[in-house]
Amino acid sequence: MYGETEEELFKNAKEHGIQVHGYTEETWNKEISKNKEQFKNLIKRS
Ligand SMILES: [Zn+2]
């Protein structure tokens, strides 16, 4: 994953989740809201 800003990273990750992992916008947003801090750490390392 790549992105200039955190916002862009989130957007790219979301598109990836939807296209590759079969999330819908709704299920993706639910997952992110549950795991937001964890997710931020994950995308900072990648
Ligand atoms: Zn993936």
Image: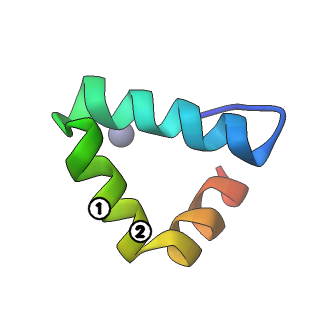
When asked about the image quadrant of residue 21, the answer is top left
Report the residue marked by disc 2. Answer: 33
Q: How many marks?
A: 2
Q: Ligand 1 is found in which quarter of the picture?
A: top left
Structure colour scheme: rainbow
> Residue 18: where, in percent of width, then height?
28, 31
Q: Are marks 2 and 1 in contact (CB under 8 Å)?
A: yes
Label 2 crowd bin: few (<14), some (14–19), many (20+), radius 10 Å:
few
The residue that disc 1 covers is 30
* Quadrant (top left, top right, bottom left, bottom right) of the N terminus: top right
Disc 1 Cβ-to-ligand 1 distance below 8 Å: no
Write the residue at 40% across / 30% down.
Answer: 16
The residue sitting at 42% across, 27% down in the picture is: 15
Label 2 to label 1: alpha-carbon separation: 5 Å
The amino acid pointed to by label 2 is Ser
Residue occupying image coordinates x 52% and y 65%:
39
Q: Secondary structure at mark 1?
A: helix
**Residue depicted at 36% across the width and 75% down the height:** 34
Q: Farthest residue in the right direction?
A: 4
Nearer to us in this view, 7 or 45? 7
